Image (cartoon, rainbow, N blue to C red):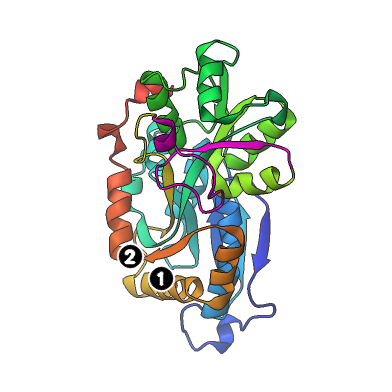
């Protein structure tokens, strides 16, 4: 089990004093990645305000493993009472499930909401002295670089496979890390020369000078790194479909609709609050809100990614 912290209202009102209302006790929010990644960053930026809206504490628990499937499965099998939910990403979760097949139909997860959109970026260890996306491509073409780091089966893995197949970035060896945080750390330490992860997870290391930002994997660019060139700027293959992720909150399949809606309403109010809007503006981490219906449709689509992804290339 992963590390847990509690955010929200200290000394919240307990179940005996809430007359059976939901929620009458603390909420458990699972982060299916390690600490320091984008999902962890968003949870710590938004969930305290969700707790304020609900009037309870929110316990954040990191449960990494199997490219997020371990933590997602934990929420899938939780008591369907609305007290446990998971903050995962789409379409990444669907791809990860292809690589870590279980007997669980994760497309039946109950969608609460989508609360953020995050592009992937490419970064490098400063010692590599990579000067932009054209230089990056040339270094791989010449064989000066062969390794590229990232999560196994994440959307950015698919995007980089597409770029390799089209000859834009002909990397040879994909070095696997369990989430964005460890990938950033690996590039910062020089364990890998180049990696890809979410812009939110790379921001701190870039600010500290531990990694250099090289490019953005979606033509929409990055609000965290607004001046960084995109795949479109470089003239590379369009990988927008897998160049960004949607941050999604889900819970156990049989969770009552009224409790799902209560959680969704709390997320919406939190996202529109001055506190979260200021956090978003200060950090560049984009927030948005899509309700349960749109979220359920996205979940169903994401867990049908076998129609879009060649699984053999991800092994």
Q: Nearer the viewer, residue 44 or 194?
A: 194
Q: Residue at x 70, y 47 (%)?
A: 207
232 to 58, vertically: above or below: above
Is residue 26 visible in this depiction of the protein? Answer: no
* 227 and 123: which is toward the camera: 227
Where's residue 85, x and y in %?
A: 48, 60
**Residue 64: in magenta span:** no
- Identify the residue at image location x=64%, y=81%: 12
Could one spot residue 227 in this view of the protein?
A: yes
Q: Position of residue 76 (x, y in %)?
A: 42, 53
Q: In this rendering, is residue 28 above or below 212?
A: below
Element assignment for label 2: helix
Q: With 279 as the anchor, is 128 left or right in this view?
A: right
Disc 1 crowd, CA 10 A, few/some/many (<14, 14-19, 20+): many
- Please tell me whether residue 293 is drawn above or below residue 71 in the rendered image: below
Asked if labels 2 and 1 touch by Cβ distance under 8 angstroms, the answer is yes
Q: Quadrant of the C terminus?
A: top left
* Residue 115, image quadrant: bottom left
Q: Which x, y percent locates residue 180? A: 58, 41
Observer-nearest residue: 104 or 160? Answer: 160
Q: Give the residue at mark 1.
A: 264
Write the start and end of the magenta stretch as one range.
209-235
Quadrant in the rendering for residue 129: top right
Q: Position of residue 14 (x, y in %)?
A: 61, 81
Q: Would residue 156 be found to the left or right of residue 301 on screen?
A: right
Q: Specify few, some or many for label 2: CA neighbours under 10 Å numbering under 14, 14-19, or 20 or more.
A: many
Query: Which residue is under mark 2?
Result: 292
- The structure residue drawn at horizontal position 39% and vertical position 73%, both measured from the top left corner, is 259
Q: Secondary structure at mark 1?
A: helix
Give how far apart the Cα atoms at labels 1 and 2 are: 7 Å
Please identify the dominant SS of the magenta region.
loop
**Which residue is the extreme one toward the left?**
307
């Amino acid at each position: 089990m992963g590390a847990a912290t509690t955010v929200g209202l200290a000394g919240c009102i307990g179940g005996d004093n809430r007359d059976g209302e939901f929620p009458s006790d603390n909420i458990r929010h699972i982060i299916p990645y390690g600490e320091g990644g984008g999902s962890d960053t968003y949870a710590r930026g938004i969930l305290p305000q969700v707790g304020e809206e609900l009037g309870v504490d929110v316990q954040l628990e990191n449960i990494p493993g199997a490219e997020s499937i371990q933590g997602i499965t934990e929420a899938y099998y939780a008591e369907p009472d609305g007290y446990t939910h998971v903050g995962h990403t789409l379409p990444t979760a669907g791809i990860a499930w292809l690589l870590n097949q279980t007997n669980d139909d994760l497309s039946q997860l109950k969608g609460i909401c989508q609360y953020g959109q995050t592009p992937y970026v490419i970064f490098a260890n400063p010692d590599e002295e990579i000067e932009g996306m054209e230089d990056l491509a040339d270094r791989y073409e010449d064989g000066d670089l062969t390794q590229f780091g990232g999560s196994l089966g994440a959307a950015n893995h698919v995007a980089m496979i597409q770029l390799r197949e089209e000859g834009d970035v002909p990397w040879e060896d994909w070095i696997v890390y369990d989430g964005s945080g460890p990938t950033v750390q690996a590039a910062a330490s020089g364990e890998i020369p180049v990696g890809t992860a979410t812009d939110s997870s790379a921001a701190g290391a870039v600010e500290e000078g531990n990694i250099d930002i090289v490019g953005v994997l979606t033509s929409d660019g990055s609000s965290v790194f607004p001046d960084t060139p995109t795949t479109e700027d470089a003239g590379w293959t369009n990988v927008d479909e897998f160049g960004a992720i949607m941050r999604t909150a889900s819970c156990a399949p049989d969770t009552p609709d009224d409790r799902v809606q209560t959680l969704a309403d709390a997320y919406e109010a939190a996202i529109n609050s001055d506190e979260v809007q200021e956090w978003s503006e200060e950090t560049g981490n984009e927030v948005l809100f899509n309700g349960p219906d749109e979220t359920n449709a996205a979940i169903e689509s994401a867990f049908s990614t076998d129609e879009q992804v060649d699984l053999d290339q991800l092994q």
